[in-house]
């Protein structure tokens, strides 16, 4: 599962960010919750790969018409956590849409 909370996860931006970081050819990566990492290329590639796998899996489940509870069970997330994350994502989406309307008004 990506380490970024689902309501704020932007898979395309995460991919671009990991690519930009890889171009820096850094020797050390300070990763929140994981500490100092010296295997920078591996961490960045792993992050990109796992995110792509996760997005593909979730899209396939959604396209198969799975319910939130079914998706949660398949991904090992309790329904309560999944519902809370889903509600947070809907609130974030609502905030973004309301913000756009206000800017366009």
Image (cartoon, rainbow, N blue to C red):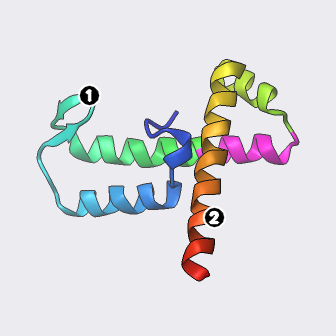
Q: How far from the left and from the top, in percent, is residue 31? A: 24, 37
Give neighbour class at mark 2: few <14, some 14-19, many 20+ (Cα, 10 Å). Answer: few
- Residue 97, disc: 2
- Residue 92, disc: none
Write the residue at 78% across / 40% down. Answer: 61
| Residue 7 position by quadrant | top right
Per the image, the residue denoted by label 1 is 34
Residue 60 located within the stretch drawn in magenta:
yes
Q: Residue furthest left?
A: 27
Which quarter of the rendered picture does the C terminus lie within?
Answer: bottom right
Q: How far from the left and from the top, in percent, is residue 53? A: 58, 43
Earlier along the polypeptide chain: callout 2 or callout 1? 1
| Residue 73 position by quadrant | top right
* Viewer-side residue, 34 vs 68: 68
Please, is residue 96 above or below residue 51 in the view?
A: below
Question: Total label count?
Answer: 2
Circle 2 sits in a helix, a strand or a loop, which is it? Answer: helix
Residue 25 located within the stretch drawn in magenta:
no
Circle 1 sits in a helix, a strand or a loop, which is it? Answer: loop
Write the residue at 79% across / 44% down. Answer: 62
Q: How far from the left and from the top, in percent, is residue 44? A: 32, 47
Write the residue at 18% across / 39% down. Answer: 30
Left or right: where 49 falls relative to 86: left
Q: Rounded to the nearest whole Å, what is the CA distance between mark 2 and mark 1?
A: 34 Å
Please, is residue 101 above or below residue 63 in the view?
A: below
| Image: magenta residue range | 55-65
Please, is residue 4 above or below residue 75 in the view?
A: below
Q: Nearer the viewer, mark 2 or mark 1?
A: 2
């Amino acid at each position: 599962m990506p380490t970024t909370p689902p309501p704020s996860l932007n898979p395309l931006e995460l991919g671009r960010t990991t690519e930009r970081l890889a171009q820096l050819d850094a020797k050390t990566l300070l990763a929140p919750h994981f500490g100092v990492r010296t295997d920078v290329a591996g961490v960045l590639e792993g992050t990109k790969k796992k995110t792509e796998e996760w997005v593909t899996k979730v899209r396939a489940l959604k396209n198969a018409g799975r319910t939130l509870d079914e998706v949660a069970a398949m991904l090992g997330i309790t329904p309560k956590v999944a519902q809370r994350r889903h509600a947070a994502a809907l609130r974030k989406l609502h905030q973004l849409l309301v913000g756009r309307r206000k800017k366009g008004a």
